[in-house]
Amino acid sequence: MIKKIIALIILVCLTSSCSIYHITSTSTTDDYYPSQETTEVVYLDRIDDAYTIIGTITVNAERRQRLDNVIEKMKHEAAIMGGEAITDIQSNATGPWKRLPIQQTIGNAYVRANFTASVVARK
């Protein structure tokens, strides 16, 4: 009976879906930028004003994660870094599925993706 319960717990854990984010940030400047409120950080497709790139943020998430959720995680990290905006979001697939030689057969089987953005502040 205990073996069945353990097997059931393992099965539930393996088949359950959870969103795990891994967020890393790198500062590219020695200047100090005070922290912002998350609500003050915006996402911009392009920036017309003069700006300084103060760092980059990488969010590792599930491939099918909505971009809105990823942007919110990026905004929070950018606020800690003192950024006023995030821009230039790029995505790439990672993990062992992407390295398999039979990519034409499995296509979209990879499950993780890195989303990278630049953190900027006005000059």
Image (cartoon, rainbow, N blue to C red):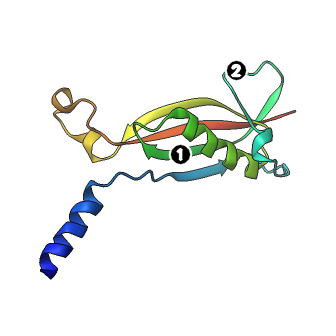
Q: Residue 104 sits in which quadrant?
A: top left
How packed mark 1 is, by other alpha carbons closer than 10 Å (few <14, some 14-19, many 20 or more), is many
Q: Which amino acid, mark 1?
A: Val
Seen from the viewer's position, the closer of residues 39 and 103 is 39
Q: Is residue 58 above or below residue 4?
A: above
Q: Earlier in the sequence, mark 2 or mark 1?
A: 2
Residue 108 vs residue 92: left or right? left
Residue shown at 38%/37% (left/top)? 93
Q: Which amino acid, mark 2?
A: Arg
Residue 123 vs residue 12: left or right? right
Residue 46 marker: 2
Q: Position of residue 42 (x, y in %)?
A: 74, 33
Seen from the viewer's position, the closer of residues 62 and 9 is 9
Residue 59 marker: 1
Q: Secondary structure at mark 2?
A: loop
Residue 6 vs residue 71: left or right? left
